[in-house]
Image (cartoon, grey):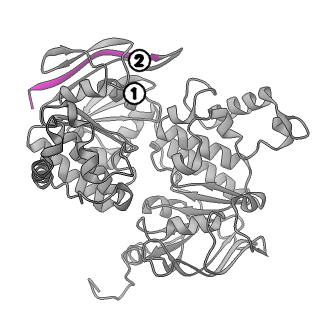
């Protein structure tokens, strides 16, 4: 891998007074996987948005195959063989997979006769799909396919446009372990063909597994470039955060006092294996973290929506603080002291066009502390002071409180949600994938905050596809499989093998493959 195909020299990108990238230089070789590693807000996505033409650098130069290039738009980047798969996919839901792949190709050489070459285009794209193992249904609409398949569509779209340099921004954040292995197989095929990949991730084990080199960013600067074979997870974590990072081991709570959430024989859309619930009976107590383990798509989303009043069960009963709920509405659940960290921060957790400070008071704007006189007129000084306090407390990295939520990195968006929900001092916190997309430092901080809330008496229903997170945090653990509870386990000495079998729909003693 001696052939350098990309050089970024002394790249600086400034937004107002905020320096997102500070004199960063980067080299990428042919057939190489280079990982950009760093905390949320370290400048990784900004640097790649410069390379892909979404941002113009304040200063610095970019060379492709030794030639100085000016990249003013994503179209310019595509012509130079640069393709980027963003963390939040840029696909059009109303269109089919095939239509998304060929969208916007009328200005390219391949697309000038697009309206009479569809059959040939499908054949050519199918051959490319087969070559790299990018299996997708060309005729399905985007909402009909899994997240992993949507990612394959984005990769196929970039390759079809001639990408030799593929940028993958947090590509495993929403993938199952099996889908991640499938993605890594695709990456290896691509690099084996001489294509190069820039990989952005927070998952240290995956970074070491897939990378040739690792470049660490901190506060917008490059602090090191390391061969993956020369590091372990601990040393990478320390380099990333700039200090010795110790993995916490939390004391487990054995308190089983007051029941704050009581679900009995809950059924919802029972005919569906992946979007339904069948006979769910469980209770969450004051001062405990109750973890829900399982592979995504086994009823976890529906469970979270029922417990926060977004949908109503078909049958069964749900009680909060001993009072049975008759009408399911988010407002009623909020008034009963239930906070919610939703699984989709963009669609359910934030209003993208609103500022950080507005999102931070979104559920509390009617309270007297944020208004001028008995609920009338917003008190802008108090709202700003609240934002400044929470931005500091939760390490929300931004240019100012006036920045809109959609302009933040995924990790900082999640911090805004967590700040708002935890500051409400809930009696019950429903946390669905609360650390998805967060770096190790932020993840540790959020875990600390959840443990602190638990120790102050908050009941927490933790839903996560990350079994390590479930085992680390949970006082009790339930496993969901195809909408049913496979078992409930003590979190102090959890039977890991039994839990793993339950996640696959089997119980200990079952014959292999049964």
What residue lies at 56% left-to-right and 23% top-to-bottom?
399
The residue sitting at the front extreme is 116
**Image quarter of residue 133:** bottom left
Q: Between residue 180 and residue 265, name the one nearer to us.
A: 265
Q: Report if the CB atoms under discs 2 and 1 are less than 8 Å apart.
A: yes
Q: Tell me the quarter of the image containing the N terminus.
A: top left
Residue carrying label 1? 46
**Image quarter of residue 474:** bottom right
Q: Which mark is residue 406?
A: none
Label 2 to label 1, Cα distance in Å?
A: 8 Å
The answer to whether residue 73 is left or right of residue 302 is left
The answer to whether residue 286 is left or right of residue 206 is right
**Image quarter of residue 457:** bottom right
- Image height of 394 relative to 297, above or below: above
* Residue at disc 1, secondary structure: helix
- Asked if the magenta segment contains residue 89, the reply would be no
Q: Would you say residue 211 is visible in this rendering?
A: no
Please provide percent x and percent y for residue 259. Answer: 73, 73
Q: Tell me the quarter of the image containing the C terminus.
A: bottom left
What residue lies at 67% left-to-right and 44% top-to-bottom?
420
Q: Mark 2, residues whose alpha carbon is within 10 Å: few (<14), some, or many (≥20)?
A: many
Q: Mark 1, residues whose alpha carbon is within 10 Å: few (<14), some, or many (≥20)?
A: some
Q: Which residues are magenta?
A: 1-14
Which of pointers 2 and 1 lies earlier in the amino acid sequence?
Answer: 2
The answer to whether residue 215 is left or right of residue 428 is left
Please provide percent x and percent y for residue 126. Answer: 13, 54
Residue carrying label 2? 13
By secondary structure, the bulk of the magenta-drawn segment is best described as: strand
* Residue at disc 2, secondary structure: strand
Please provide percent x and percent y for residue 294. Answer: 44, 69
The residue sitting at the top extreme is 59
């Amino acid at each position: 891998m001696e052939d350098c195909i990309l050089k970024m020299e002394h790249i600086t990108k400034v937004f107002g007074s905020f320096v997102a990238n500070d004199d960063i230089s980067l080299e990428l070789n042919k057939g190489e996987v280079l990982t950009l590693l760093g905390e949320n807000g370290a400048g990784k996505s900004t640097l790649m948005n410069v390379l892909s033409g979404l941002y113009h650098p304040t200063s610095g130069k970019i060379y492709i195959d030794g030639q100085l290039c000016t990249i003013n738009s994503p179209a310019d980047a595509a012509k130079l063989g640069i393709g980027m798969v963003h963390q939040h996919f840029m696909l059009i839901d109303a269109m089919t997979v095939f239509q998304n792949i060929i969208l916007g190709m009328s200005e390219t050489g391949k697309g000038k006769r697009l309206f009479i070459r569809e059959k040939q285009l499908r054949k050519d794209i199918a051959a490319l799909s087969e070559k790299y193992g990018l299996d997708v249904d060309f005729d399905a609409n985007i909402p009909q396919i899994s997240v992993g398949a949507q990612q394959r569509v984005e990769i196929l779209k970039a390759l079809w446009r001639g990408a030799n340099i593929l940028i993958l921004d947090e590509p495993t954040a929403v993938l199952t372990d099996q889908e991640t292995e499938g993605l890594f197989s695709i990456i290896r095929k691509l690099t084996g063909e001489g294509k190069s990949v820039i990989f952005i991730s927070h998952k240290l084990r995956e970074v070491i597994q897939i990378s040739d080199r690792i470049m660490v960013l901190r506060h917008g600067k490059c602090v090191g470039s390391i061969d993956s074979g020369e590091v372990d997870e601990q040393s990478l974590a320390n380099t990333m955060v700039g200090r010795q990072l110790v993995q916490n081991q939390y004391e487990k709570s054995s308190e089983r006092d007051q029941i704050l959430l009581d679900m009995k024989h809950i059924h919802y859309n029972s005919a569906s294996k992946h979007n339904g619930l069948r006979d769910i009976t469980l209770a969450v107590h004051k001062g405990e973290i109750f973890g829900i383990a399982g592979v995504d798509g086994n009823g976890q989303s529906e469970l979270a929506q029922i417990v926060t009043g977004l949908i109503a069960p078909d049958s069964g009963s749900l009680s909060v603080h001993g009072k049975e709920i008759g009408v399911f509405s988010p407002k009623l659940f909020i008034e009963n002291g239930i906070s919610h960290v939703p699984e989709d921060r963009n669609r359910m957790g934030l209003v993208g066009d609103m500022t950080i400070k507005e999102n931070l008071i979104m559920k509390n704007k009617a309270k007297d502390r944020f208004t001028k006189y008995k609920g009338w007129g917003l008190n802008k000084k108090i709202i700003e002071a609240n934002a400044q306090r929470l931005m500091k407390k939760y390490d929300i990295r931004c240019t100012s409180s006036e920045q809109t939520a959609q302009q933040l990195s995924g990790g900082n968006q999640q911090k805004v949600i967590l700040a708002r929900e935890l500051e409400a001092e809930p009696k019950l916190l429903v946390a669905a994938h609360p650390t998805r997309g967060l770096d190790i430092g932020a993840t540790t901080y959020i875990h600390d905050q959840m443990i602190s809330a638990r120790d102050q008496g908050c009941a927490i229903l933790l839903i996560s596809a990350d079994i390590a997170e479930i085992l680390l945090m949970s006082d009790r653990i339930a496993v969901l499989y195809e909408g049913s509870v496979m078992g409930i386990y003590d979190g102090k000495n959890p039977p890991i093998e039994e839990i793993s079998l339950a996640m696959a729909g089997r119980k200990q003693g079952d014959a292999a493959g049964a």
